[in-house]
Image (spheres, rainbow, N blue to C red):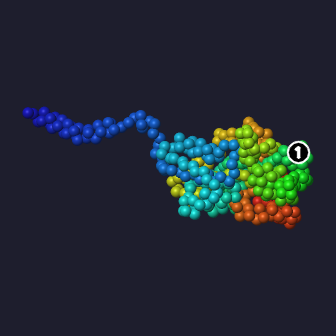
Amino acid sequence: MKLKDWLICVAAALCIAAYLVAMPRYIDRGISADPYREWIMPDKEGYTGILSVWHIVGFKPYAGSGGEWLIARAKQLERKHYGVYVEVLSMSVEECEARLARGESADIYSFPLGWGYAERFLPLQREFNGLKVGLLETGMQDGVLYAVPFMASGYALLVNTRLAQDRKVILPEEGVSAAWLNDAAEKLTYETGRNRKTKYQGLSGNAVAAALLGANVPAADYTVFQAQRAGLAVAELRAAGDLTRAQSAGKGFTFEALSLYRYTDLVQYLGVARGIDESKLPYAYEFLELALGEKAQAELQPLCVFPVMELEGMHYEPAIVQKTYELLKDPVVPNAFLYQRYKDALKDAANRALNGDEAGKTELLARLEELVNGREIK
């Protein structure tokens, strides 16, 4: 064999050997590759696992569930991020406190105004624009944003129409004045029956909300109104919804609901836990942003609760919800964290005001003026 032929044979043998050594690895890679899976699979997430959200219920919508609305936001986030799951748990304030006492915690808290102190939450390093005037500031402390509001409700004056007719109480044509309220409450406070044992209260419901109306008669618990032993109640819109549903089921009693003022402390917030794992933080921020998106805010309408931004085409039924919505287009809301600090003092001052103590009334109005940053409460 000539040298040239021999060299060609050696080169060919080396190529074949290299092929036999290297090719199985490429063949295996080709067999295991799944082009379809690679096409549908998103980029690798910075975090995969569970993002926990506690929905602490301070007030309920006129209809439906705020927790279900948050679950819809959770599903939005899950669809965008493969391997990220959002667990929304609804609970009462008392259930939440019990969980915290056992050492449990969440990544994100949905909480009512006045529930927690700012120290529980991480300062939010994002801009949240488009909220109604003054609302964003209610989630701040010392100029730092710790929580963002995402839905609100309001108060109404409920009137038992049978008792009002029996006591010749004529409903006001426009607005609930302090003079009308006190006169009506006086007429609706009476005793009847054998030995006058059946007692009727004139006013019931939320003490602070009633005192802000200028009431100077004691307010019984709302359950007295439910039992038809009080003629008036200052209550959340949810109460009107519950009474309407009871009527539809052939139960309950007839009532009228009157709109009140621009003030409300029925506001729900979202805050990120101070101890959240840093890898979860981008997803927590995105959850907040989804909750404040126009689509999500518009979906509050079926619940008859109000968005925190001005949206076109929002209309509510029944009329009491629409009237309250119109008032709360320019809401007067206390600071979420200062309210937590002073809520017991506010309730005490309100109860004193309802019992005719002018000093209590003065203290209540002065404290609330501080909490709403000087805005006029009407």
Whether residue 149 sits left or right of residue 349 in the image: it is left
Whether residue 276 sits left or right of residue 7 in the image: it is right
Whether residue 299 sits left or right of residue 28 in the image: it is right
Q: Position of residue 167 (x, y in %)?
A: 90, 48
Residue 34 sits above or below residue 166 on the image: above
Residue at the location (65% across, 45% down)?
Answer: 65
Q: Which one is nearer the viewer's eye here, 157 or 255?
A: 255
Q: Amino acid at mark 1?
A: Gln
Residue linked to disc 1: 165
Q: Which one is nearer the viewer's eye here, 33 or 342?
A: 342
Q: Position of residue 126 (x, y in %)?
A: 62, 52
Residue at the location (46% across, 36% down)?
Answer: 40
Tag 1 secondary structure: helix
Q: Position of residue 270 (x, y in %)?
A: 64, 52
Q: Position of residue 319 (x, y in %)?
A: 79, 39
Q: Quadrant of residue 210?
A: bottom right
Q: Quadrant of residue 1?
A: top left
Q: Residue furthest bottom?
A: 359
